[in-house]
Image: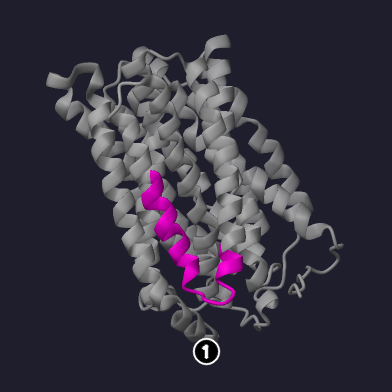
Amino acid sequence: MQQPLTLPPGAGPTYPRYLLTLLMLSSILNHLDRNLPAILLPAIKRDLELSDSQLGFITGLAFALFYSTIGIPMGRLADHVSRRKVLAVCLGLWSLATAVSGATVNFIQMAIARFTVGFGEAGYAPCAHSMVSDIYPPGRRTTAFGIMAIGTPLGGVIAFLGGAWLLETVGWRWAFFALGMPGVLLAVLIWFTVKESARGAADGYVDPGKPPPFLHVVKTLFSIPAFRHCVLGTTFTGLVYTAVTIWAPSYLTRSFGMTAGQIGVWLSPAIGLGGMCGALFGGWIADKVSAGDRRWMAWVPAITTPVGAVLGTIAYITDNQTLAVIMIGFPLILCPVHLPIYGAILQGLAGVRMRSSFPAISLFIAGIVGVGLGPQIVGWGSDLVRPWAGEESLRYGLMVVVPFFGLWAGLHFYFGGFHLPADFARAKERV
């Protein structure tokens, strides 16, 4: 028998689906605006005369520095005030910053625009995860996160297909504007239609009404062995996914001469349909297999991330264009499997007024290292070997980064799984 949902005051039976739809749309725009520069990089590089290291910065650290550091105060704010309002303001901000990216004329201006996108997107995960957890009980939570996580691959598809079409039709500047502005309308809809749920109600917890001190939250989180391993697992999984998403289009352009339109058509099935199946499968299978053994919540990504990374590495070894495109798809399909699982793990470990702060602190670690350093490391490696590798330099950077961090992520998820049953039990005792 399924556990019942917990509705906010005045909400009808369809409200949970409505909320998930809005959060999924927000996630789509979150990852669309984050990944859009990837398909536009060759044109941006040419027009703004940037190096690969500079491109790695604007797609990695320029975004991740604010995305990660601002996430913590955003999480604390969401634990204190209306999560609906925090999310709406953040969504409007990152959407406007994406649109403004098309007006930049040099490296500094583009970096500032990407800083601002990161600032706004920092508010999404803390608010969204907390809101879902107060409606969906533990036995249905991972599946709900899986539906929300569809936004990751769908955002990539729209960025690649829509960005490629707009690039070839009206140029990269208008692509930023056209794909950035819809988020402003969604922000208005969230502000006026989303309701605040009673915190902790889906778990039968009583809301204490006030979050504990921040240092207590940090101390509590890092005292949990499962968190320490799983946060590194999700960090390195994100590093692999981001490195592939950002640099694969440029790699295919330089090594195989593919156009932006061809890349969008070839890669979008893996990013979209494959990533959707990966996220949904991850959420569904984790709910099923972990019902009898909670360790499998972490052991599922302990399998999928390394397999995706190792298979994906073949793309950078081969000289066959078709095989390269096919193999690039494996990490794009299998890495998103961890997203709903990790979200459910965090919420299961968090107290009532820690449910925004836990993902925010995690976001700081995963954002700086995974989202920020992934593209940057590949860019540095590419520039390092360019004197002798020429246009093939990206091949070697990706060839090292993808398998190394993919296997490392798998090890942490594996070890983290052993601690989950005891850590979930201790979480209930703390509440």
Is 402 situated left or right of 186 in this image?
left
Magenta stretch containing residue 277, yes or no? no
Characterize the magenta stretch by its predominant secondary structure: helix
Q: Which residues are magenta?
A: 286-308
* Image coords of residue 392 (percent x, y): 24, 21
Residue projecting furthest to the top = 169
Would residue 112 be visible to someone looking at this image?
no
Name the foreground residue: 97 vs 359: 359
| Helix, strand or loop status at disc 1 | helix
* Image coords of residue 332 (percent x, y): 47, 40
Magenta stretch containing residue 293, yes or no? yes
In this picture, is 409 found above or below 273? below
Residue for badge 1: 429
In this picture, is 13 found above or below 330? below
* Image coords of residue 136 (percent x, y): 69, 67
**Which image quadrant is residue 106 in?**
top left
Task: Identify which amino acid the numbered label 1 is placed on.
Answer: Glu
Name the foreground residue: 41 vs 244: 244
**Which image quadrant is residue 411 in?**
bottom left
